[in-house]
């Protein structure tokens, strides 16, 4: 499984495996908005023919927060979950963040989901929790924000 920056031609497979609630056109527009953006890289995991995972790592823009990078849009196709791929993707995201001289990597998720357990399993520590911070059709969830050191 190769972890590489997203390409325009990944739209159909990303829609199929990771972003089923979006149309291919919406996924293509999202890719368009993420390619060649300064201090942002959108990564996919490529199984040789299909993109089966996605995440975007972004360096924060506020002048006091330039040492921080955030992982967003982290989705792995169900068939590829629990295979060690999440760790490989976070390691690759960390490599980009270090190249930007970031020392803090951040991620967030809905409280009480597998993502929260997985992120702790990947070495992130909770630093903030907003009770009921996310409201969606599936219910109301805490917004949990986590971090890990990239130095030391
Ligand atoms: C969130 C997501 C990207 C995590 O990927 P994953 O493949 O499910 O993650 P894993 O189950 O491999 O967990 C990652 C690590 O944490 C560990 N872990 C998982 N649950 C754990 C637990 N309860 N206690 C301790 N460690 C745990 C795993 O063993 C793994 O470590 P390893 O690499 O040493 O094996 C994936 O589940 C996903 O795409 N979910 C749907 C979309 C989503 O919810 N995205 C987040 C949006 S906020």
Image (tube, rainbow, N blue to C red):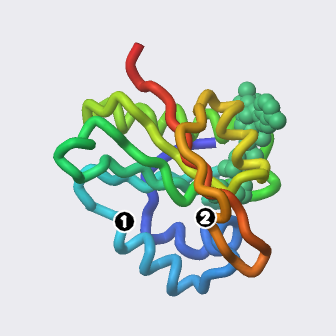
Q: Is residue 53 visible?
A: no
- Residue occupied by mark 1: 34
Place of residue 147 in the rendered image (x, y in percent of width and height, measured from the top left): 51, 36
Q: Give the image quarter of residue 15.
A: bottom right
* Quarter containing the C terminus: top left
Q: Where does ligand 1 appear, by image quarter?
A: top right
- Secondary structure under tag 1 reads helix
Residue that protrudes farthest toward the left in the picture: 63
Q: Residue at x 44, y 74 (%)?
A: 30
Q: Residue at x 80, y 56 (%)?
A: 78
Place of residue 146 in the rendered image (x, y in percent of width and height, measured from the top left): 55, 40
Q: Relative to 129, does residue 151 appear above or below in the rendering?
A: above
Place of residue 55 in the rendered image (x, y in percent of width and height, measured from the top left): 53, 54
Q: Which mark is residue 116?
A: none
Q: Earlier in the sequence, mark 2 or mark 1?
A: 1
Q: Give the image quarter of residue 79.
A: bottom right
Q: Residue at x 70, y 45 (%)?
A: 116
Q: Nearer the viewer, mark 2 or mark 1?
A: 2
Residue that protrudes farthest toward the top in the picture: 152
Q: Residue at x 33, y 53 (%)?
A: 40
Q: Relative to 115, does residue 32 appear above or below in the rendering?
A: below
- Secondary structure under tag 2 reads strand
- Residue occupied by mark 2: 133
- Asked if residue 79 lies left or right of residue 11, the reply is right
* Quarter containing the N terminus: top right
User: Along the line of sight, which residue is nearer the eye, 42 or 120?
Assistant: 120
Q: Is residue 6 visible?
A: yes
Place of residue 17 in the rendered image (x, y in percent of width and height, measured from the top left): 70, 66
């Amino acid at each position: 499984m190769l972890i590489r920056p997203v390409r325009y031609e990944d739209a159909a497979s990303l829609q199929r495996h990771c972003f089923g609630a979006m149309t291919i056109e919406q996924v293509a527009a999202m890719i368009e908005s993420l390619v060649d953006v300064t201090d942002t890289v959108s990564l996919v995991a490529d199984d040789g023919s299909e993109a089966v995972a996605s995440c975007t790592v972004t360096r924060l823009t506020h002048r006091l927060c330039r040492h921080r990078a955030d992982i967003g849009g982290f989705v792995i196709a169900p068939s590829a979950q629990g295979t060690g791929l999440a760790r490989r993707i976070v390691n690759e995201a960390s490599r980009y963040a270090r190249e930007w001289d970031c020392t803090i990597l951040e991620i967030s998720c809905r409280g009480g989901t597998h993502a929260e357990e997985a992120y702790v399993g990947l070495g992130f520590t909770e630093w903030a929790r907003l009770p009921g911070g996310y409201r969606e059709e599936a219910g109301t969830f805490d917004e949990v924000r986590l971090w890990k050191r990239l130095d030391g």
